[in-house]
Amino acid sequence: MNNNSEDKNVVLNFLAGMGLGAIVGAATALLLAPKTGRETREDLKAAADDLRVKADKVMQDLSESSEDLVKKSKDILESTKSKVQQAIDVGKQAMVHKQEDVAEEAESTES
């Protein structure tokens, strides 16, 4: 579970760095381009809108990945619980059989 948390942090840090790099790169390109103020503002607005769409997509993907991870974890937990319960039942049956064997042996020894 700890590795999943570390993997998630690595992905989030990477995405944050990528987003920051995109913002800085876009802003630098727009501010250094020989355009009028109106064109630059329009370009900045378009870049901000594009970044918002990309950020929404990344958040949606992360949300879906998290939901998948939770579902898989629940499935594994249920499977493990079932296997543990089966092992307990087998152990109980073995104990009952052993007690019966010991009781029979004790009776035959007394006779």
Image: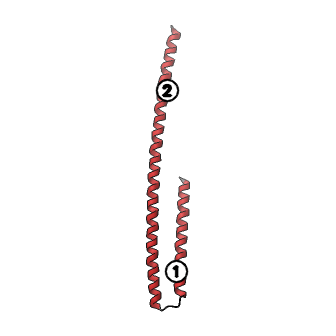
Foreground tag (2 vs 1): 1
**x, y (%) of residue 81?**
46, 41
Give the number of the disc on residue 101: none
Residue at the disc numbered 2: 94
Give the percent coordinates (x, y) of residue 105: 52, 14
Q: Identify the residue at the far top of this view.
A: 111
Residue drawn at point x = 46 percent, y = 27 percent = 93
Q: Which of 90 and 53 is in front in this view?
A: 53
Label 1 near label 2: C-beta < 8 Å? no
Pick out the residue farthest to the bottom.
Answer: 36
Neighbours of disc 1 within 10 Å: few (<14), some (14-19), many (20+)? some
Q: Which residue is drawn at 46% across and 84% down?
A: 43
Question: Residue shown at 47%/55% (left/top)?
Answer: 69
Where is residue 22? Give x, y as percent: 53, 76
How packed is label 2: few (under 14 Cα within 10 Å), some, or many (20 or more)?
Answer: few
First-in-chain label (2 vs 1)? 1
**Where on the picture, by quarter, is residue 49?**
bottom left
Q: Which mark is residue 26?
A: 1
The residue nearer to you, when weighing 35 against 52, is 35
What's under tag 1, amino acid-wise?
A: Ala
For image coordinates 49% across by 34% down, the residue present is 87
Front-lying residue, 92 or 26: 26
Which amino acid lies under the numbered mark 2 shown in the image of this protein?
Answer: Ala
Note whether 109 is above or below 27 in the view shown.
Answer: above
Residue 57 lies, in percent from the top left, at 44, 68
Q: How far apart are marks 2 and 1 (CA)?
A: 71 Å
Kind of element beneath mark 2:
helix
